[in-house]
Amino acid sequence: MSGHNYDHGKSTSSKRQKLKELLLKSDNRICADCGAPDPKWASANIGVFICLKCSGVHRNLGTHISKVLSVTLDEWSDVQINSMIEVGGNSCANAIYEAFLPEGYAKPNSDSNYEERANFIRSKYELQEFLKPSLRIVPSKNTSTTCGSGKDSDSVSGSASVNKTSQAGMVEFIGILNVKVIKGTNLAVRDVRSSDPYVVLTLGQQRAQTAVIKSDLNPVWNEELKLSVPQNYGALKVQVFDQDVLSSNDIMGEADVNLQPMITAATAFGDPDLLADMQIGKWLQSNDNALIRDSTINIIDGKVKQEVSLKLQNVESGGIDLELEWIPLAQ
Ligand SMILES: [Zn+2]
């Protein structure tokens, strides 16, 4: 029998059996992300078994990052089952996706709320923050070593599987943008005397926001937000809102950040780890942009950084200070 598996052919049911056997391995008896017992779901492209609650977060990442299937209810294609078997289960996958989990990092547990789960799961799979940096730069390889077949090694043997996953799922992101929202200055009054401001960042389909600071026109956030940057990135949109419990939240100005000078300069200069501290580029202040002054792009301690001071647009007053950091994912 060849072609599509619309029915339950013999080969399909024996594959299913293999999937069930994999699920019964001890490391797959707890959720790969939060440790909750008895996971009944899986991310077929990442190759992990996860609990119902974490599966909700995975689903919201989009199928280009995580393809969620029920172990018991969904139809699995042979390709999907094979990729689960190839990754080798939760401990193999975590050995790679959590290789650089900072010491003392608190992973979510079975009682964690949606937000705690979502933060972790995004960092782990979408932004790949804990992945060995060398694995992020993925030249195509034809090796197909697996972690699952007997060996319990958690180092090199699993990397090929993850490379494939990255190619299938992450190819559209070229890097991570860390945005430290430092402070606002002289923001507009939206309530009687003050405002309760927060900042929303938007890049393509992604959105991140800071905490609300009560009654403060010169709020200091010092809050770091992360966004992954797609290949065809546009401007980073910065918006400031006033939280209003009685009516809809009022906008207190906005500004666009052109990411191109930073990404272009960083790409031209190459691996920042190998460079001494220096200036590599500049986004120039002009009448067409929201910059208060020229914004330089620097290598600082092996990182690409840019300080940006913006005058908020479409509002009577206000400015926002940001610090950007660019982390390329591929070269
Ligand atoms: Zn879970």
Image (cartoon, rainbow, N blue to C red):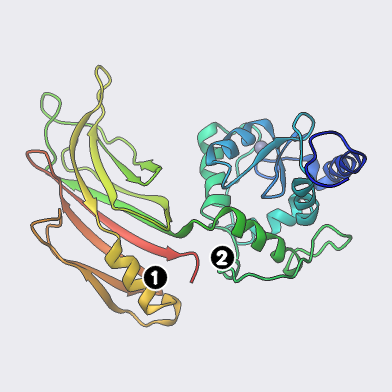
Element class at badge 1: strand
Q: Is mark 2 within 8 Å of ligand 1?
A: no
Q: Tell me the residue at 30%/66% (across/down).
A: 262
Question: Vertically, is 208 above or below 258?
Answer: above
N-term-proximal mark, 2 vs 1 = 2
**Residue 98, x across and y down, in percent:** 63, 56
Tell me if 182 is positioned left or right of 315 in this view.
right
Question: Vertically, is 256 above or below 267?
Answer: above
Which of 108/10 is in front? 10
Q: Which mark is residue 303?
A: 1
Q: Tell me the residue at 37%/79% (across/down).
A: 269
Question: Label 1: few (<14), some or many (≥20) within 10 Å?
Answer: some
**Residue 1, x across and y down, in percent:** 89, 45
The image quarter containing residue 214 is top left
Q: Tell me the residue at 86%/34% (across/down).
A: 8
Tell me if 96 is positioned left or right of 261 in this view.
right
Number of labels in the image equals 2
Q: Given this view, does label 2 or label 1 mark the residue nearer the observer?
A: 2
Q: Tell me the residue at 69%/65% (across/down).
A: 159
Ligand 1 positioned in quadrant: top right
**Residue 35, x across and y down, in percent:** 70, 40
The image quarter containing residue 247 is top left
Say what amino acid the circle numbered 1 marks. Lys
